[in-house]
Amino acid sequence: MTVVSIRKVGDPVLRQIAEPVTEFDAELRTLVRDLNETLAKSRGAGLSAPQIGVARRVFALNPDLPGNTVRLDHLVNPVLEFPDEEEQDGPEGCLSIPGVFLDTKRRMNVSAKGYTKQGDPVQVVGDGLFARCIQHETDHLDGVLFIDRQDEAGQARLLATLSEAPWFDARIKVSPH
């Protein structure tokens, strides 16, 4: 079992745009296994490759998430589509920002296309928490953290709280989604 350290906010890899996966090989299968084992140990909802220091477009999902009817446990090179404009607003946290939970707006419904670790195409459709998790992890692949989705007042409160930590990166990035 390989459980990898999760990078914390302030680590530069969390702000990089992850590179697409082009080789569906043993190295990718090992990465997916490491993501799944680290996620299971941390008891989170999802974990992206950048969160363990690998700037590749891969993330793991908890297969037991409500709405995960296909029990998807990873997605490679995800591309998101939104079938409507409906939004949800609720608490969200991140394994890279431990102990912080903030109400965060996300789309209620999502369709995600990508690949399995073997290179097989896959498409999943989800809503609620499952949709939130897919959007959150895809943001990580674009160098965006959920704190970037807060309004100015929320960002100011969070920055004031975290500004004393020497590892915290105070830059805010706009999500392309």
Image (cartoon, rainbow, N blue to C red):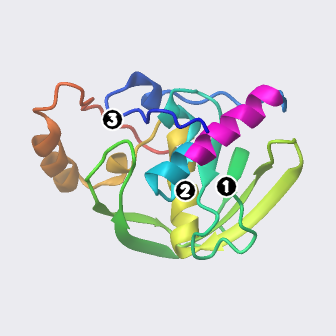
Quadrant in which the N terminus is drawn:
top right
Q: Is 167 one of the magenta-colored residues?
A: no
Quick check: 23 above or below 37? above
- Secondary structure at numbered mark 2: helix
Q: Quadrant of residue 72?
A: bottom right
Q: Amino acid at mark 2?
A: Gln
Residue 9: which disc? 3
Q: Up-down: is 57 above or below 47?
A: above
Among numbered discs 1 and 2, the one appearing first in the sequence: 1
Is residue 22 visible in the rendered structure shown here?
no
Q: Is residue 7 left or right of residue 172?
A: right
Image position, residue 18 (x, y; %): 60, 30
Magenta span dominant secondary structure? helix
Which residues are drawn in magenta?
Answer: 26-37
Q: Mark 2 or 3 closer to N-term?
A: 3
What residue is shown with label 2? 135
| 63 with respect to 177 (left or right) | right
Q: Position of residue 81 (x, y in %)?
A: 68, 60
- Check contact, mark 1 vs mark 2: CB within 8 A: yes
Q: Secondary structure at mark 1?
A: strand
Q: Residues within 10 Å of mark 1 (few under 14, many from 20)?
A: some
Of callouts 1 and 3, the N-terminal one: 3
Q: Which residue is mark 1?
A: 80
Q: Is residue 36 magenta?
A: yes
